[in-house]
Image (tube, rainbow, N blue to C red):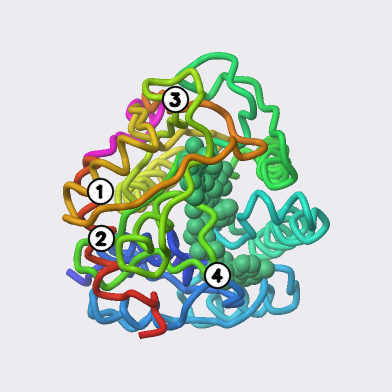
């Protein structure tokens, strides 16, 4: 009996941190991903490493999600070649909260207008399935912990607004045609790297986020960590977040696609987190113990816009998608350290 052909997927932003890890899981699950990335924050080296880890030659298109003509061509050509795109995994976007406050139009343009352009091209090609990278940031100031998906949506910065707007667009898009399926995955704090040490997070310039900052201190690229606030009403005064291994997140996308392909249609928003909160100091101490590196730090005032603590109620993901995070904080630190110590300058080595 002939093997069933691998379902073709368009993966926007596949050259980025979460996208590149997800490509590995998608390929291993039997999908044929076509990557569309403008390389504004992604790396062609990451894609080469995905190829060597999986033994699979990737199809890569350098281009922008805001380019309607390009998108039409991509959808049209795959159809003409007999392997039409069956779904889209949509990572492409801008993600720095502070930058979104300084340059909101860029964020609305890329994240919102870019997604509208993508959806219009999907409509033209009659592609009805999308998995979208949303964020826990859509919840804004927590009313209670953990965040469930029923928590009010009230983002407090333009980046979060773009995610909430796209979720609303997808909800309305699904409501107009029963066959349409959109799953918004609300990520908590992805950290860590592929256990091979070949793929990881490679932020440009000074990292905004805690984990890559810690690993850069550990490898000697930065002198010390600034801890923003030690007077929060938390376990030790420092901020608490739900850190999740990037590969657990990647598996979540495969599960979301399986779910979407098995349903008749509709919209869903699902938290992807571990359900466990970890403070800055707890993460720092775990990382030090795993890496054997001392991480000097200084307490600084609270960072504007930060909340004291947040973590996920991940029960919807388990009930709906059959997904649960399996990797520990120690795994996240070990894998993140392996990546950083072997690639001190990211993909530039
Ligand atoms: P990333 O910057 O590493 O990846 C995004 C990719 O999209 C990059 O490769 C970039 O080159 C590409 N891109 C950006 N604009 C594009 C455009 N107009 N057209 C085509 N490609 C474009 O970010 P990431 O951490 O992998 O995040 C992926 C997604 O997940 C983003 O949508 C982000 O907002 C969301 N998210 C990330 C986090 C996090 O902490 N990393 C948390 C919640 C949600
Ligand atoms: N922190 C420091 N020092 C640093 C960086 C961060 O002490 O140099 C602290 C923060 O104050 C916070 C914690 O570490 O308490 C985590 O901060 P991150 O910047 O790593 O993560 P955030 O929770 O602020 O935001 C991240 C992403 C957002 C996303 C959000 C929820 O940056 O895009 O998680 O998913 F929306």
Say if disc 1 is inside 8 Å of ligand 2. Answer: no
Q: Secondary structure at mark 4?
A: loop
Query: Residue 3, percent across and down?
Result: 23, 69
In this view, 13 is above or below 137: below
Task: Tell me if label 2 and label 1 are in contact, CB under 8 Å.
Answer: yes
What is the C-alpha distance between the residues marked 3 and 1?
19 Å
- Dot label at residue 205: 4
Circle nearer the viewer, 3 or 2: 3
**Magenta segment, which residues?**
316-327
The answer to which quarter of the image holds residue 110 is bottom right
State the mark number for residue 211.
none
**Label 4 near label 2: C-beta < 8 Å?**
no
Where does the image place residue 255, in percent across and percent down from the top left?
35, 45
Q: Residue 208 in the image: x percent, y percent?
A: 54, 55
Of residues 22 and 146, which is closer to you in this image? 146
Sequence-earlier tag: 2 or 1: 1
The mark nearer the N terminus, 3 or 1, is 3
Residue under numbered circle 2: 337
Q: Residue at x 48, y 33 (%)?
A: 270
Dot 1, how many residues are within 10 Å of its Cα: few (below 14), some (14-19), or many (20+)? many
Residue 152, given in percent of the width and then of the height, sits at: 65, 21
Is residue 344 toward the left or the right of residue 86 in the image? left
In terms of sequence position, does the residue under pointer 2 or pointer 4 come before the other?
A: 4
Q: Residues within 10 Å of mark 4 (few under 14, many from 20)?
A: few
Return the disc, 1 or 4, that comes first in the chain's sequence: 4
The structure residue drawn at horizontal position 49% and vertical position 18%, both measured from the top left corner, is 233
């Amino acid at each position: 009996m002939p093997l069933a052909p691998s379902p073709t997927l368009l993966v926007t932003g596949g050259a980025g941190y979460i996208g590149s890890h997800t490509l590995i899981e998608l390929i291993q699950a039997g999908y044929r991903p076509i990557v569309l990335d403008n390389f504004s924050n992604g790396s062609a080296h990451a894609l080469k490493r995905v190829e060597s880890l999986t033994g699979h030659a990737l199809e890569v298109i350098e281009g922008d999600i805001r380019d309607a003509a390009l998108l039409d061509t991509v959808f049209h050509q795959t159809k003409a070649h007999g392997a039409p795109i069956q779904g889209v995994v949509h990572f492409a976007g801008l993600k720095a909260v502070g930058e979104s406050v300084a340059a909101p139009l860029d964020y609305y343009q890329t994240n919102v207008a870019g997604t509208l352009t993508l959806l219009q091209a999907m409509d033209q090609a009659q592609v009805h399935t999308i998995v979208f990278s949303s964020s826990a940031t859509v919840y804004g100031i927590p009313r209670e912990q953990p965040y469930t998906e029923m928590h009010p949506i009230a983002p407090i910065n333009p980046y979060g607004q773009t995610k909430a707007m796209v979720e609303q667009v997808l909800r309305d898009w699904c409501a107009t045609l029963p066959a349409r399926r959109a799953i918004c995955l609300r990520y908590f704090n992805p950290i860590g790297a592929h256990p091979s040490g070949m793929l990881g997070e490679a932020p440009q310039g000074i990292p905004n986020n805690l984990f890559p900052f810690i690993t850069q201190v550990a490898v000697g690229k930065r002198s010390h960590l600034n801890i923003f606030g030690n007077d929060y009403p938390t376990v030790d005064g420092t901020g608490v977040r739900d850190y999740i291994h990037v590969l657990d997140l990647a598996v979540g996308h495969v599960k979301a696609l399986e779910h979407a392909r098995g349903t008749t249609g509709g919209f869903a928003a699902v938290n992807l987190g571990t359900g466990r909160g970890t403070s800055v100091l707890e993460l720092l101490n775990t990382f030090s113990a795993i890496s054997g590196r001392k991480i000097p730090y200084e307490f600084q005032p609270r960072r504007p816009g930060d909340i004291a603590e947040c973590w996920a109620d991940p029960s919807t993901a388990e009930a709906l998608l059959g997904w649960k995070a399996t990797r520990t904080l120690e795994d996240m630190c070990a894998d993140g350290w392996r990546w950083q110590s072997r690639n001190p300058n990211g993909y530039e080595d």
